[in-house]
Structure formats: structure tokens, C-alpha cells
Image (cartoon, helix red, strand yellow):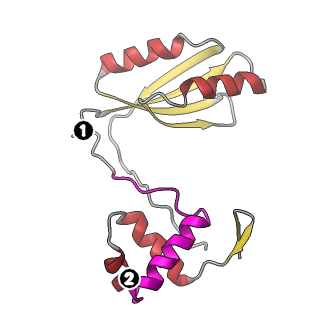
Amino acid sequence: MKLVNSEHFTVDSIDIQILNILQNHGGISNAELAEKISLSPSPCSRRVKLLEQAGFIRGKVTLLDAKAVGLPVNVFIQITLSRQRKNNLEMFEKNIRDWPEIMECYLITGDIDYLIRVAVPDLDGCHEFLDKLTALDGISHIKSSFSLKQICYKTAFPLDHL
């Protein structure tokens, strides 16, 4: 039994099948989805709606190819703030949250405070981003690493534990 949105929600094997299929084929029609899980379209649609309402499905997107859209360079940037007080962390997060170049940002444990992944077209784009980043107050250290090759990239979570 899972506690989601303050309500008990039991996930069964059909729900897990639905989630696995939708993670890998977000544009699938309800009729195709229903056929794949051997359910009629109406109950299938109801299950998807319930999964959405329970918070399992955050949204639907189309994944673009980074090279095709001119953003082949991934830069991983480690950021250490000068002070790790709550208001400093909140201010940093508020400042960078909507920057379009930032694909992921994590507050992490250890010697650094944040790890971000930035998608840029080239080295000049990285330099421009770093200029913008270094203009923020409260940053004491920045370390950048360029990805040479993407070995693995997934958007689908493993659901075997459910």
C-alpha cells in the first residue's frame, strides 16, 4: 500500500504495466495502451486518470535529441556556497531555478552544495553561462566538468520494487 497525496492508493500489477508503458511510450493512445495490457479502453483510461490524481504521473513530454536541437555539450558544474544557511540556499535556488540552460540541479551532501547539469551549444555557450553564474552573490567555488560521451541516459524509473 502506498501513501500518496494523503490517500491510500494500492498499486497492482496492471498499474505497474501502465506506468512502465507510459514511461517509455508517452504518446501511446489509450486504445493502444489498453490493448497492450489486455484491458478495455474505458477502464484503462480510468486507471491512468487515477494514477495521475495519485501523483504517480507528473506530466507528459516529448524528449528531444540534444544534438539535433544544437545543444550537444553537457557540462556538470559543482557549486559550493560561501555559507550554507537556509536563506542562502533558498536564494541560490530561486535565482537559478528557471535558467533554461540548467537541465538538472541537485542539492547534495559532501564537500559541495549543488550539482547541476547544463546543456549548451559549445564552449562559448559554457563561458556565457559561467559568466551568468559567477555574477550571483554567495558562491565561493565552482568546478566544471565536460561530458565527453553519454554512456547511458534514462527517463524511465525501475518499478520492480512496487
- Three-letter amino acid code at the position of disc 1: Lys
Cβ atoms under marks 2 and 1 closer than 8 Å? no
- Could you say where residue 71 lies in the image, as x and y percent from the top left? 29, 33
- Please name the residue that numbered disc 1 is placed on: 67
Q: Is residue 108 left or right of residue 49?
A: right
Using a 10 Å C-alpha cutoff, classify the residue at mark 2 as few (fewer than 14 neighbours), some (14 to 19) or many (20 or more). some
Tell me which residue sits at (56%, 72%) in the image: 50
Instruction: Name the residue rendered at 68%, 28% in the picture.
Output: 111
Judge whether residue 49 is colored magenta.
yes
Q: Position of residue 112 (x, y in %)?
A: 64, 28
Give above or below for 143 relative to 12: above
- Is residue 6 or residue 162 the one in the foreground? 6
Amino acid beneath label 2: Ala
Magenta stretch holds residue 161: no
Q: Is 146 or 34 nearer to us in this picture? A: 34
From this view, report whether residue 153 is shown above or below residue 95: below
Q: Quadrant of residue 94?
A: top right
Q: Residue 18 in the image: state x and y as whole percent.
A: 46, 75
Label whose residue precedes the other's in the sequence (2 or 1): 2
Near mark 1 (Cα within 10 A), the count class, few <14, some 14-19 or many ≥20, is few
Q: Which residues are magenta?
A: 36-62
The relative height of residue 2 versus residue 145 in the rendered view (above or below) is below
